Image (cartoon, grey):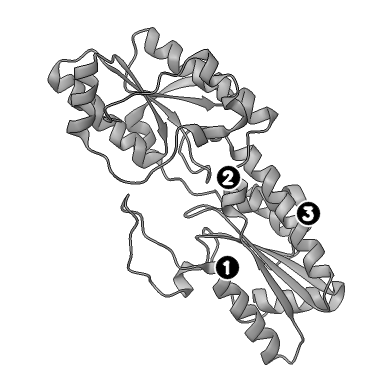
Amino acid sequence: FYASDYLQLNARRLHLSHHTGGSMLGASRGGFDQTKIMDAVEARGINQVYIVGGDGTHRGAQKLHEEARRRGLKVAIVGVPKTIDNDIGLIDRSFGFKTCIEQARKAIECARVEAASAPNGVCVVKLMGRDSGFIATHAVLSSRDVDLCLIPEVPMITEGPTSVYRHLRNVVRTKGSAVVVVAEGACQESLENTNQKDPSGNKVYADVGSWLKRQIQANFTKHSMECNIRYIDPSYIIRSVPANADDSEYCTLLAQAAVHGAMSGFAAFSAGLVNNRTVMIPITMIGETSPRKQNIGRVWARVVASTGQPF
């Protein structure tokens, strides 16, 4: 942000940008330097700063707004909520979420083919979702090819009549194969603590997909059942594709709402969709309500009805 040279985003440079998603802007974790950013804003005479990111990014945006007020600068700090996990509070959904579900369903379809191509085949698909299972649940509901879904909000039961392993064995006996979808933040209570954090201060989770693959294999072996297991992690493939038609339109709505608010004299807000209406949300409220977890209600009941897994 405070580099010596800025890239001017004119019409000629941007006429194909909607085909590449956020790749042209790049993404990063950590490195927030409030003083350097505001020094650059002040030195260049910038009066509008648009911040695209999740709850941590919005907390940083609030600090920039407070620093601008302290310096007496007339600068509008404006946010646009962005997270592939869809775990930002208050808003209906994050942009890119529906594209993500569309791509995740393709990965699940590949998993179904892989599982069915081997005797007693089981294919595990790990999807993004650190603290919430929005991607996993909605991908499962859109595909209807999944036999077990594991998300952070629902503890994994490994023993007794409602054991997920018992369920999988029954599915394989009946259908000859099974597909498992697991969110990256699921089952972490059963995994070894990495004791690591990323540059943004978020806890680094152990790889639940590899762990689950080993556990399923061991359980089938324990019960003298053959199991040909595969593991697919399409996370970065899913989030690197261009937006679909729905998300492209949604991005336009959010961008126009953000600019309209700033040009109208508002600051320290984030443009979002609430009850299907574009609104301006105080940036502080984004930080206070995020990350959110998925309510275990009707949506999860639909998942259970689709997969047939124990409730």
Q: Secondary structure at mark 1?
A: helix
Q: If the image is split into quadrants, where does the N terminus sit?
A: top left
- Which dot, 1 or 2, sits closer to the camera? 2
- x and y percent of residue 101 in the render? 66, 44
Task: Determine the secondary structure under disc 2.
Answer: helix
Dot 3: element: loop
In the image, 231: left or right of 60? right
- Give the residue number, with chain letter if any, for mark 2: 239
Q: Earlier in the sequence, mark 3 or mark 2?
A: 3
* Disc marking residue 193: none
Q: Quadrant of the C terminus?
A: bottom right
Q: CA distance from mark 1 to mark 3?
A: 20 Å
**What distance separates the C-alpha of mark 3 from that of mark 2?**
21 Å
Where is mark 3, residue-wise? 144
For disc 1, the neighbor class at 10 Å (few under 14, some 14 to 19, many from 20) is: many
Q: Amino acid at mark 3?
A: Arg
Instruction: Kindly identify the residue that appears in the image at 86 percent across and 72 percent down.
Output: 175
Q: Quadrant of residue 284?
A: top left
Kindly identify the residue that appears in the image at 69 percent across and 28 percent down.
245
Q: Earlier in the sequence, mark 1 or mark 2?
A: 1
Q: Position of residue 55 (x, y in %)?
A: 38, 40
In the image, taking residue 311 as reference, residue 84 lies left or right, namely: left
Residue 81 locus on image (x, y percent): 45, 32
Residue at 49 percent of width and 32 percent of height: 24
Residue 216 to residue 188: above or below:
below
